[in-house]
Amino acid sequence: EVHLLESGGGLVQPGGSLRLSCTASGFTFTNSAMNWVRQAPGKGLEWVSTLNDRGYNTSYADSVKGRFSVSSDNSKNTLFLQMNSLRADDTAVYYCARGHTVGITLWFDPWGLGTLVTVSS
Amino acid sequence: QSVLTQPPSVSAAPGQMVTISCSGSSSNIGINYVSWYQQLPGTAPKLLMYENNKRPSGIPDRFSGSKSGTSATLGITGLQTGDEADYYCGTWDSSLSVTVFGGGTQLTVL
């Protein structure tokens, strides 16, 4: 069974850093485009970042570009999101999701349970 | 303000049918595939539909998807109380070069 599990969330002060992890099982990690999607409290979904299936192409939402960095450890089937210069509006549940590509469109399945990041002093 | 526009809420009685619209533009829905996600209260999103109208394994045929021009629609027939959830559409925006989601629609089964 395909499974994703995030970890690393918590409370951090504005300007601080946090690294999220997503451990995958049940599929070939290196053959997948892996993604981070977040959801602020009471709000909708916002795509954050994609690491392509070769592991060397990355893309980011404008809201996190220059502050967040996505990477992976393929030997451990683990995806990371390094988050620096955190702001209050980064407060959200962060989901890891496996991406499936058709043309240039991504659809996401499955999703992890999510990990909550709270940025507050 | 989301790039894709969904109604904030829809409601219908058990056993009835409901449709949820997702309106976009020529740079997103007009030229790319649409996917739909169901988010039950307090849980992670779950894929409901991909490539406009394809159902993943395990999704009942009460759920259907369609696309016409720059809009997409999710249809649910035979509504059940267990269908109460938030529903999101998503696609790629070729002008912005990002994946975009609708703002979400809360379904209430009265």
Image (cartoon, coloured by chain):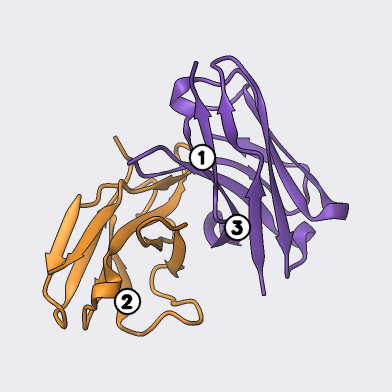
Chain colours: A purple, B orange
Figure check: B67 above or below B71: below
Which residue lies at the image location 50% right of the left edge and 20% below the top edge?
A: A87
Viewer-side residue, A67 vs A100: A67
Instruction: Answer yes or no: are tags 1 and 2 on the same subunit.
Output: yes
**Location of residue B102 in the rendering, given as x and y in whole percent from the top left corner:** 33, 48
Which element is circle 1 on? loop
Question: If the image is split into quadrants, where does the N terminus of chain B sit?
Answer: top left
Asked whether the viewer can see residue A10, the reply is yes
Question: Crowding at label 2, few (<14), some or many (≥20) Cα neighbours within 10 Å?
Answer: many
Which element is circle 2 on? strand
Which residue lies at the image location 20% right of the left edge and 68% below the top edge?
A: B19
Viewer-side residue, A51 vs A91: A91
Q: Which residue is mark 1?
A: B97
The residue type indicated by label 2 comes to: Ser
Q: Is residue A74 left or right of residue B41?
A: right
The residue type indicated by label 1 comes to: Ser
**Location of residue A105 in the rendering, given as x and y in whole percent from the top left corner:** 52, 56
Q: Which residue is mark 2?
A: B64
Instruction: Answer yes or no: are tags 3 and 1 on the same subunit.
Output: no
**Picture quadrant of residue B70:** bottom left
Mark 3 → mark 1, Cα distance in angstroms:
16 Å
Mark 1 → mark 2, Cα distance in angstroms:
27 Å
Q: Earlier in the sequence, mark 1 or mark 2?
A: 2
Task: Find out whether the residues at labels 1 and 2 contact each other: C-beta distance under 8 Å.
Answer: no
Q: Which residue is mark 3?
A: A99
